[in-house]
Amino acid sequence: MQPALWNSTLMRRFSALDRIYARIEDSQQYFKQASTQAGNPIACPRRCGTCCIHFTPDVTALEAERLALYLLVEKRDLIDPFLGRIEESEKAGETWDSDKACPFWNPDKPGENCMVYPGRALVCRLFGYCAVLDKKGRPSFALCDKMPPLADRGERIFTGEETLRGLFGQRPPLMDEFSREILALDPSGAGERRSIIEALPAALSKISLLLRLAESDSDSKSALPAAEPGFGLSSTTPSAEADSDPDDFPIAS
Ligand code: SF4
Ligand code: SF4
């Protein structure tokens, strides 16, 4: 019998999520190139990586499960320290505020601070390079305070499609659009996002159980996506991902 992890719904959702992540990367590259050509280059200072000193991300259940699968297959050594830190924090009666440093942020590796970079969630992927809709529904882009100001402009928030295209050649990727797409992958989640501190332990338990079931079924081993070059999200080829169809995902039904 086919183990539950390779159930087509879950794997198709992971595959669709990977393709959204790849499109985010593509659209950020286009935005960076366009901003450079327009004379207002948007770029992080070299080896900055300080986004997560005071930030712990919120994720959907699907994003947490995708990250759990990444950890269980490629970064197992990070799991115990992560769970240990949560346990310690609970024992000490501390609450994990969203402005506390992310548990996967490594201060000792400037420029490569994220220990789960290939598996990080939507909000982490959009740091520095996205617009959000303001109360009037207009795209608004805030320059990260670690980035230099634009030449001859004192302000750091730019609003409106026309303004953004004028300054940067194109509008930055819109967080609301990608966020909606991700929420639509799992309608049962009711749009809920939870702190990675709450969501990831449950996701690890679920995916770990499914992996154990898969491992106990010798027939299933050929279906393990670890054999796929794109399983580590970092190694996915955006164009190849974008070209693939969710129904073509190599899973048994
Ligand atoms: S988004 Fe901002 S804080 Fe993060 S690496 Fe870029 S400049 Fe630094
Ligand atoms: S998962 Fe990585 S990118 Fe996201 S907040 Fe944590 S350290 Fe930063």
Image: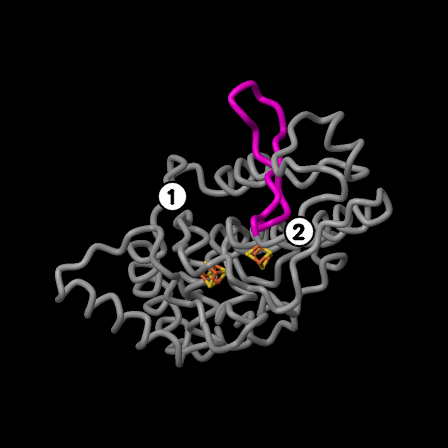
Q: Nearer the viewer, residue 101 or 233?
A: 101
The structure residue drawn at horizontal position 53% and vertical position 35%, both measured from the top left corner, is: 180
Residue 36 % position (x, y) = 82, 49
Number of other residues with Cα within 10 Å of mark 2, as a class: few under 14, some 14 to 19, many 20 or more:
some
Residue at the right extreme of this rendering: 37
- Relative side of 185 to 138, left or right: left
- Relative side of 4 to 120, left or right: left
User: Gap in Å between the C-alphas at discs 2 and 1?
Assistant: 32 Å
Q: Disc 1 marks which residue?
A: 193
Residue at the top extreme of this rendering: 136
Magenta stretch, residue numbers? 126-145
Name above or below for residue 146 compared with residue 220: above
Is residue 31 located in the magenta-colored stretch of the structure? no
Residue 74 % position (x, y) = 49, 76
The structure residue drawn at horizontal position 59% and vertical position 39%, both measured from the top left corner, is: 142
Name above or below for residue 237 compared with residue 187: below
Q: Disc 2 marks which residue?
A: 148
Q: Nearer the viewer, residue 183 or 43?
A: 43
**Mark 2 close to ligand 1, CB under 8 Å:** no
Q: Secondary structure at mark 1?
A: loop
